[in-house]
Structures are given as C-alpha cells and as structure tokens.
Image (cartoon, grey):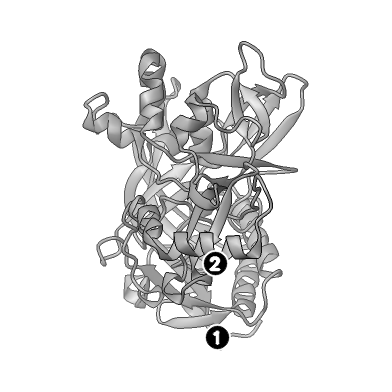
C-alpha cells in the first residue's frame, strides 16, 4: 500500500538506436547530470547495517505480550504472511539481529504460533509459550535504546466518477507512459541500490514533471490515464499520502486504487511547512487540522501542495488495500517498516499508544496499544530502525487514529527457536 516502486517503460518520440541509447544515457548517469539528480533529493536516512537494526533480548527484558485486540484479526494477518512466504524460495534468508533464518523457518515459526493462538490461550499461557519456544529481538530504535516513533495510516474512501464534470474535476492518475526508471547499478557497481526516475526527451533523460507542472501546467494530458475523478483536491492529495483507497462511483461500483509509482521527486511534508509558517501549531498538527485549514484558506491550497513536488500514481486492483508484500492488509495488525532492515512477513510485537474517542469523534485521551503485528508494508517516509507505521483500516476511528498518532514505543520481533519441532 505504501509507495512501492515497480516500473517502467520508455516511450520515446522516435526510435532510439543502440548507439544513441548507450551514449546519451551513459553520459547522463556517469556525467555531471547524475550529480543533479542525486543532489536534488534529500539526504537519505542513515541506516545501521541490517545486522545491527535489532538486538537479541534477554528474558529479563521481555515485554508483557498482552494483546488489546481480538486474536481473530491476528490469525487473518498471519495467514496473509504465509501466502507471501509460500511464493519465495524456501532457502532465502532473512536477518534477525546478528542471526539469519531461512524463509522455510519463518513459515514454520508463523504456523507454530498460529496453531497455538487457535487454542484461545490465556495471556499467562501465551507468555509462557513465547518464553519457552521463541527468540525475541528488539529494534534498536532511533536512539539505539529502543525508542521507535509510531505513526498511522488508513484506507480513505472517496466519491468519484469515471468522467469529469464541473463538480468532479480532479483526476487520480495512472502511471504515465513516458515515465521511466533507470537502475544505476547497471552502469557502475558503486551505485548499487540507487536509481533515478525521469523521462526521455531530446536524446537525454530529465527529471520527471513535478507536482506544479502536473497540476497547473497539465503536463500529464495524453500521457497518463485518469482512473477516476473526484471533487476535492485535498482528497487526492491525502490519497497519495496513504497509498491506497476505495473510490465509490455514482454507478454504485467501487474501485480499488493502489500505489503504482511516483514521479521520483523528493517528498516534502506540508505539515512541517504549516508549522514553520505558523499556520498550525505543532501541538495541534494532524491530518484533520491540515484539511480544515486548507478548506478555510483555498487560496493557499496550491502553494501548500506544490511545496511537496512528489506525485503518486495509481493502478486498479480487484481488491484492497494491498501492502508491499502484495497481500491484503489487516486493520490493526499490519505494520509498515523499513524494508531494508526488517524481515518481511515476520511476526512482531509493538507497544505504543492509541486514541480514546468520545461521542463527538474527538480524542478524549490516549491509552496503551500493545499487540502482535505482521511486517507487511513499507513507506517512503518509514526509514531506519526508529520508525513504524500502523495500518488502522478504514472508517471514522481509523482516520482519527491515523491522522493523530505520533507516539514513541517499542518494537520486537519473534522467531521460533531452531531446535523446536513442528
């Protein structure tokens, strides 16, 4: 659901000869133009090596392992992780601190846990089961002491139409045909893991259109298909932030729109901008506050949105929302983490906060949120061992929780001890 990049094709105005493609693109990548592309992006988060993102915990430091949700949702989430693991080679290995485990062992670990929770154990029985059968690892967090910042996301519901009119005139775009992604490691090993996104023009590659060019100069006309049209530009913007959503059409049909790619431009927070310009205080900042401010000041909408040059494109899916592992996310049980540091599909345990909402849909207080989750998603802003994004589902409470959650907490991973039988 969260900003996964999987591209792309090159649509040129005229055929490229082999000679032209090699010389023009190599000149771009290995010459000064490469510096422009990379320098134009924000400095990446400094990640620790994969083996240092988690540390093995002593039994004296284990969390309580109490769960504030019904275990039915946990069963659903585990089953989705098992679907993913069935599709990867059994011998593929994943890092847990300084230890590595094969995908086959992750599968066994989840199956064993699933069998036990189906017995509806008490919290005491569950804690004993985990202490006896599992190894626990804790994220080092953003301070190397285990502090993790938790935020939330949700699946927005929008009303839209397949054809524009005076009221429904803001498009949800599919991936443009002229957008391309170049893997830099193909040209030099020192660029391993780096890529650039752009478009081909005049025998060279230039950065892809930014948000202002797309929204004010209509740069995508004839290049990207509108999947649907909605009437509120704020809805489109927040849909791009969340990564997936449902659009309820006037024909009574519902379509699932899912993240397909970005324009490659750096993401800049409009919340941070509104705080810095003293439009919204840091204490009041939330997704809901941003929406109400922009609706009250429509003349500021375009410049505020254009502060974030990043633009997200979508594709249609038969169901949703889907996470990075291409499995359905489970509300309250799916979490987005840095995919370079944490093992996909693995069982985790979190401790953070959740809102208590009154009858007027206002947050009355915050209470403990402790539960088992599955690592099934990722996100462009979810970088490093000190960030986690919890999927809340859809509906009013999910929107409130996702819009306001910004609390610290702890993150643990569980894996079955290798010497344990099925």
Disc 2 crowd, CA 10 A, few/some/many (<14, 14-19, 20+): many
Residue at horizontal 39 percent and vertical 36 percent from the top: 308
Which residue is under mark 1? 418
Screen quadrant of the C terminus: bottom right
Residue 64 sits above or below residue 88 on the image = above
Is disc 2 placed on a helix, strand or loop?
Answer: loop
Residue at horizontal 60 percent and vertical 55 percent from the top: 6
Please state the horizontal and vertical placement of residue 411, each as a whole percent of the image: 39, 61
Q: Residue furthest bottom?
A: 419
Q: Is residue 318 left or right of residue 329?
A: right
Which residue is under mark 2? 346
The answer to which of 90 and 124 lies nearer the viewer is 90
Q: Earlier in the sequence, mark 1 or mark 2?
A: 2
Residue at horizontal 73 percent and vertical 19 percent from the top: 250
Q: Is residue 14 left or right of residue 374?
A: right
Looking at the image, is mark 1 or mark 2 nearer the viewer?
2
The answer to which of 318 and 116 lies nearer the viewer is 318
Please state the horizontal and vertical placement of residue 159, each as a whole percent of the image: 64, 22
Please state the horizontal and vertical placement of residue 115, each as a whole percent of the image: 66, 68
Calculate the distance from the C-alpha at mark 1 to the C-alpha at mark 2: 15 Å
Q: Residue furthest top?
A: 166
Residue 386 found in image quarter = bottom left
Please state the horizontal and vertical placement of residue 134, each as a whole percent of the image: 50, 76
Disc 1 crowd, CA 10 A, few/some/many (<14, 14-19, 20+): few
């Amino acid at each position: 659901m969260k900003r996964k990049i999987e591209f792309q094709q090159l649509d040129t105005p005229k055929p490229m000869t082999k000679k032209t493609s090699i010389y023009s693109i190599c000149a771009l990548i290995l010459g000064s133009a490469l510096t422009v592309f990379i320098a134009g992006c924000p400095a990446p988060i400094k990640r620790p090596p994969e083996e240092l993102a988690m540390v093995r915990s002593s039994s004296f430091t284990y969390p309580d392992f109490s769960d504030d949700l019904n275990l039915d949702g946990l069963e659903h989430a585990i089953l989705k992780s098992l679907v993913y693991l069935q599709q990867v080679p059994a011998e593929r290995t994943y890092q847990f601190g300084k230890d590595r485990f094969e995908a086959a062992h992750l599968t066994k670990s989840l199956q064993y846990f699933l069998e036990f929770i189906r017995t509806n154990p008490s919290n005491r029985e569950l804690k004993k089961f985990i202490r006896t059968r599992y190894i626990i690892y804790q994220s080092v967090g953003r301070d190397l002491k285990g502090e993790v910042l938790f935020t939330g996301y949700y699946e927005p519901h929008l009303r839209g139409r397949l054809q524009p009119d005076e009221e429904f005139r803001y498009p949800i775009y599919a991936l443009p045909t002229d957008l391309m992604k170049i893997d830099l490691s193909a040209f030099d090993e020192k660029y391993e893991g780096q890529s650039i996104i752009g478009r081909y023009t005049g025998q060279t590659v230039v950065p892809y259109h930014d948000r202002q060019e797309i929204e004010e100069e209509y740069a995508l006309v004839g290049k990207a298909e509108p999947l649907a049209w909605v009437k509120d530009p704020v809805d489109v913007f927040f849909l791009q932030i969340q990564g997936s959503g449902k659009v309820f059409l006037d024909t009574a049909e519902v379509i699932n729109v899912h993240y397909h790619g970005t324009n490659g431009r750096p993401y800049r927070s409009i919340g941070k901008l509104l705080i810095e310009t003293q439009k919204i205080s840091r204490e009041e900042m939330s997704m809901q506050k941003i929406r109400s401010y922009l609706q009250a000041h429509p003349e500021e909408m375009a410049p505020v949105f254009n502060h974030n040059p990043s633009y997200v494109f979508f594709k249609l899916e038969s169901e949703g929302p889907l996470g990075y592992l291409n499995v359905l996310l489970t509300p309250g049980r799916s979490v987005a983490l840095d995919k370079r540091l944490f093992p996909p599909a693995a069982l985790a345990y979190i401790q953070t906060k959740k809102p208590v909402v009154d009858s007027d849909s206002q947050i009355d207080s915050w209470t403990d949120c402790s539960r088992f989750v599955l690592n099934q998603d990722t996100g462009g802003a979810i970088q490093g061992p000190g960030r986690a994004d919890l999927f809340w589902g859809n509906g009013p409470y999910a929107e409130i929780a996702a819009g306001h959650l910004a609390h610290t907490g702890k993150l643990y991973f569980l894996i079955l001890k290798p010497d344990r039988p099925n």
